[in-house]
Amino acid sequence: MKKLNIKYWFFVCLVLFACTEDGGDFSPNGSGGTGTAGSFASFVIVGEHLYALNGTQVKTFALSANGEMTLTNELELYASLETVFPYGDMLLVGSQQGVFFLDRTNPARLERISVYRHITSCDPVVASGTIAYSTLRSTRCRFGNVDQLDVIDFSDIENPGIIRSYPAVEPLGLGLRGQFLFLCENGGLSMYDTADPANLEKLDELMFDDAIAIDVIPTDQFLIVTTNRGIYNVQFADTGDMRVIGQITAN
């Protein structure tokens, strides 16, 4: 297993967690795009716009070729906002009160579509097709009193609803690649088959020695896992096998 030099760690973090690629057009029957940002991202760049969470607001900035940023919109959601996830022509915003679905058809001016409300808790969220996955946790959350994974159906975007809630052990970040959901829980990384969202199948669990998995960014072939001790590169197979093939740690 290759151990990389620590001097690259900060650069990798900056690139992976500050930016994301455009997820493409939203299609109710499509797989959508998960981008390259982690599920704990509080700001993302999509195309020529930056979207940043600020308390209870989502601020939109236009980015120019010369590096200037111009504030174009402030959307008040009246909730404690935590995470933002770009998805086609939408942004999914996780908050302590629920998951907000925002329309960015006009990328300079977001509009609220709907909200799925849950008990007060911390709430990262990702999506694929018309299904969103959100973790609620008590760990490292001032307001949390439950640990679970919610599966949300937003095929009716005006009225998103719960499909099923699954118990989880200290869940944190999560990510999607194809039909597989990767969830940081119990200190490690779990891999689930989401072919039937109402009956998720756990395929594998990977632990990281003394490190605690915090967030995961799936790519086509690998998983970039951030932990409290650095970043791990994990290879996965459709059969459900995961293994660490590289790491960037402080030691």
Image: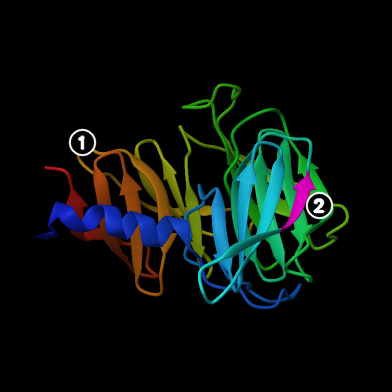
Residue at the far right: name it: 158
- Whether residue 199 is visible here, answered yes or no, is no
- Which of the two labelled residues, at mark 2 and mark 1, occupies the earlier sequence position? 2
Question: For this rendering, which residue is in front, 182 or 82?
Answer: 82
Q: Is the magenta stretch mostly helix, strand or loop?
A: strand
Residue at the (34%, 59%) spot, across then down: 224
> Height in image: 119 above or below 77?
above
Residue 210 bears which disc, if any? Answer: 1
Q: How many C-alpha atoms fall within 10 Å of the one at disc 2: few (<14), some, or many (≥20)?
A: many
Question: For this rendering, which residue is in front, 63 or 39?
Answer: 63
Which residue type carries mark 2? Pro
Whole-percent x, y for residue 79 in the image: 74, 35
Q: In this view, does 113 lie to the left or right of 79?
A: right
Residue range highlighted in magenta: 72-76
In the picture, residue 136 is in which quadrant? top right
Q: Is residue 74 magenta?
A: yes
In the picture, residue 188 is in which quadrant? top left
Residue at the (72%, 34%) spot, across then down: 97
For mark 2, what is the residue?
160
Which residue type carries mark 1? Asp
Q: Does the magenta stretch include residue 100?
A: no
> Height in image: 245 above or below 42?
below
